[in-house]
Image: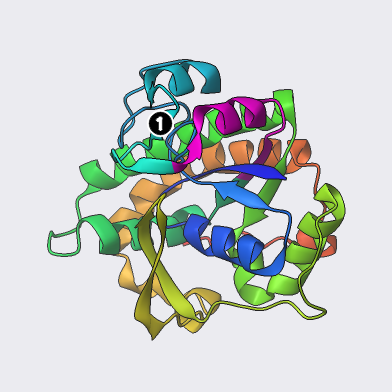
Amino acid sequence: MYFKQYGAERTGTNYLKRLIELNFSNAVVFGSVLGWKHGLYETRNGPDPQCESHQQWLDQCTTGETVHSVDGHQLPFTRTELQESISKLNYLISTKDLRSWVYSFKQFRARQRPWSSDDVAAWCRRWVDAHGNWACLLESHGGALVEFEYLLRDITPTLEAIESRFRLIRKNREFGNEPRIVEASTDLGLLFSRMHFEPKPYQNREYLSAIPIEIHRTIEKFESGAQAQLRRLRSASEMRLVDYQSNLEPSSL
């Protein structure tokens, strides 16, 4: 079973890949294979499209049977394997609440820089645009949406829904979790920190008090667009979780 992942940076894509491959014996999760996972079909890291399909990506990234990932590493998959997988891809989209994501992205990409409304506006615009592209993908090809907040609350409902939807084969009776932080990784393999991930700051929404009020106002300008794309993704997702009915709404300030 082949999965192609998409999701903005810091939405738990590597964590989700780890959970699926840790718990199911018949699942292979492509990160930035057949396209940059934070975009669509880019052949390099960064939102700069160079082709318009998985097939074009494969043609551009292949020499003989050797295929290179977006970060230039030789992949453990041959051209023939990836060619055969294209028609069998199942799409997984990871997402995170916009305010939570802005805080995470700031910590990841601009920790040493002061908050900037211009930077945040550009980040939010990119978030909304990317989610619109992924909504189109699910609407046309089908797939599943995985929301970071639900995954942190309890991995079981999400993994059970993925298991049922895609008829995966569970390795063990109980699902195994990954306590370590799954760091930014290449497609040669996931990288793990010695530190364990602490979900409480996100579960308790502690990031809200860490974001300056003027930045909250900037984010507010994009929240209606973000919610519209999220509704599209939820509607197009072929995976249903019972507690989607009690969705975590963004805070109002």
Which quadrant, please, contains the N terminus?
top right
Is residue 58 found inside the magenta-colored segment of the image? no
Would you name the residue on which mark 1 appears?
Answer: 66
Q: Which residues are magenta?
A: 76-92
Q: Foreground: 214 or 198?
A: 198
Residue visible at 31% across and 62% down in the picture: 213
Residue visible at 28% across and 61% down in the picture: 108
Is residue 80 found inside the magenta-colored segment of the image? yes
Q: Foreground: 121 or 233?
A: 233
Looking at the picture, which amino acid does disc 1 mark?
Thr
Residue 190 in sight in this render: yes
Residue 121, given in percent of the width and then of the height, sits at 31, 41
Horizontal arrangement in the rendering, residue 113 relative to residue 25 (left or right): left
Residue 82, given in percent of the width and then of the height, sits at 57, 31
Question: Which residue occupies the extreme left position in the image?
Answer: 113
Residue visible at 33% across and 56% down in the picture: 105
Q: Foreground: 165 or 246?
A: 165
Total of numbered circles in the picture? Answer: 1
Q: Foreground: 58 or 253?
A: 58
Residue 172 occupies quadrant: bottom right
Horizontal arrangement in the rendering, residue 21 relative to residue 167 (left or right): left
Residue 2 occupies quadrant: top right
Q: Secondary structure at mark 1?
A: strand
